[in-house]
Image (cartoon, helix red, strand yellow):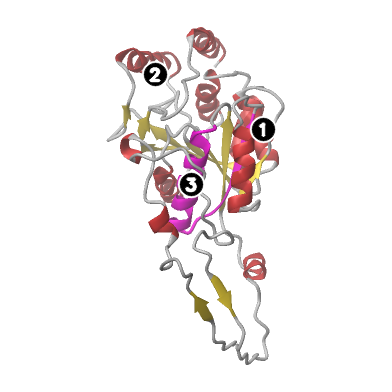
């Protein structure tokens, strides 16, 4: 084993701050209040300017040379890895916050992860923000895989999966509607029941919706009620988009799905039932977006109804 003496040099301008002390804020509602800034704290780019000096270190090398962490990970049994797919369009303010929350949740839980950002040519500069995040957290954790224009949610997932190295895929919104704190619960649920899919539900247990006006709640409840009556999917929340999939299951479902937009999420669950995939559910709190505008409009509602009738007639 190595024996060494390491000297820690504190900065003149004050004591060392930990990353937890630097980032105690989180988004609005149950996230708290925070300004839309890029979190620049990282091991390599620490704002405190702390450096480690190994001068005067005396090393005693054992017969077996120390292996790097990467070598140990390669040689050890395969660890589950979770790839988060984040499709974005005009999410400049939200993206730094959701990425920071994801990194915090994964790091505290000791979960192996990567975050894949699929930006569809956002005119608000979301791609520029993603590029900065990739530099801050490292390209092994944040992968920017942009597209030139808006091409749909389903194709965004297909594009992201081409670059995913995890054996599990997590899909979620980048607008802070889905809190990453539920992800460890998804993972526990999946392991307990060996489920193929774990879906977040707003309509079961202590799940709920916060920040929506009455009109939006009626639309969501009505859509979910209609899908339950017509399709009987065996899941309580078909229109949600916060889910965990086995990678091979998601690939198979996307091959089968033909819908676009908001109907796509609903069809995924319906097709999963047809293929006899198992589905677990975790109650979640859905919070309305903090920054930006909702992309749900009249055209999306009409498309949803058409898609619902198509699924009813063909499944």
Can residue 141 be found in the magenta stretch?
A: no
Identify which residue is drawn at 47% across, 73% down: 10
- Expressed as whole percent of the image width and height from the top left, the position of residue 236 reads 38, 27
Q: Which mark is residue 83?
A: none
Front-most of residues 288 and 224: 288
Location of residue 72 with respect to 309 vertically, above or below: below
Q: How crowded is mark 1: few (under 14 residues within 10 Å), some or many (20 or more)?
A: some
Q: Which of marks 1 and 2 is in front?
A: 1
Residue 100 numbered mark, or none: 3
Q: Which of the marked residues, 3 or 2, is nearer the chain's N terminus?
A: 3
Name which residue lies at 59% across and 61% down: 44
Q: Are marks 1 and 2 in contact (CB under 8 Å)?
A: no
x 38%, y 32%: residue: 201
Vertical order, 45 against 295 (above or below):
below
* Disc 1 from disc 2: Cα separation: 26 Å
Circle 1 or circle 3, nearest the eye: 3
Which residue appears farthest toward the front when viewing the image? 13
User: Would you name the residue on which mark 1 appears?
Assistant: 158
* Element under disc 1: helix
Residue 307 horizontal/vertical position (percent): 54, 12
In the picture as drawn, the residue positioned furthest to the left comes out as: 206
* C-alpha gap between disc 1 and disc 3: 24 Å
Circle 3 residues within 10 Å: few <14, some 14–19, many ≥20: some
Name the disc covering residue 224, or none: 2
Residue 227's image quarter?
top left
Secondary structure beneath dot 2 equals helix
Above/below status of 254 relative to 167: above
Q: Earlier in the sequence, mark 1 or mark 2?
A: 1
Residue bounds of the magenta highlight: 92-119
Figure quadrant of residue 162: top right
């Amino acid at each position: 084993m190595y024996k060494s003496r390491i000297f820690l040099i504190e900065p003149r301008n004050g004591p060392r701050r930990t990353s937890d002390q630097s980032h105690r804020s989180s988004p609005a509602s149950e996230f708290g209040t925070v300004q839309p800034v890029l979190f620049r704290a990282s091991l390599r780019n620490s704002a405190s300017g702390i450096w480690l000096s190994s001068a005067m270190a005396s090393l005693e090398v054992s017969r077996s040379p120390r292996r790097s962490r990467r070598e140990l990970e390669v040689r050890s049994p395969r660890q589950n890895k979770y790839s988060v797919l984040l499709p974005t369009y005009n999410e400049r303010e939200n993206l730094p916050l959701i990425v920071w929350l994801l990194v915090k949740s994964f790091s505290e839980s000791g979960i192996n992860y990567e975050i894949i950002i699929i930006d569809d040519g956002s005119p608000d500069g979301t791609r520029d923000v993603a590029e900065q995040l990739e530099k801050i957290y490292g390209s092994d954790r944040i992968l920017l895989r942009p597209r030139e224009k808006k091409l749909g949610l389903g194709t965004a997932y297909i594009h992201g999966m081409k670059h995913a190295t995890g054996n599990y895929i997590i899909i979620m919104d980048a607008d802070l509607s889905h809190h990453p704190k539920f992800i460890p619960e998804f993972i526990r649920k999946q392991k307990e029941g060996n489920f193929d899919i774990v879906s977040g539900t707003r309509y079961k247990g202590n799940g709920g919706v916060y920040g929506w006006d009455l009109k939006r709640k009626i639309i969501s409840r009505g859509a979910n009620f209609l899908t339950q009556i017509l399709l009987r999917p065996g899941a309580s929340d078909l229109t949600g988009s916060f889910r965990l999939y086995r990678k091979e299951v998601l690939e198979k479902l996307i091959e089968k799905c033909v819908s676009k937009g908001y109907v796509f999420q609903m069809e995924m669950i319906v097709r999963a039932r047809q293929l006899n995939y198992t589905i677990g559910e975790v109650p979640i709190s859905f919070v309305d977006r903090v920054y930006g505008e909702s992309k749900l409009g009249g055209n999306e509602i009409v498309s949803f109804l058409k898609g619902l009738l198509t699924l009813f007639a063909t499944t």
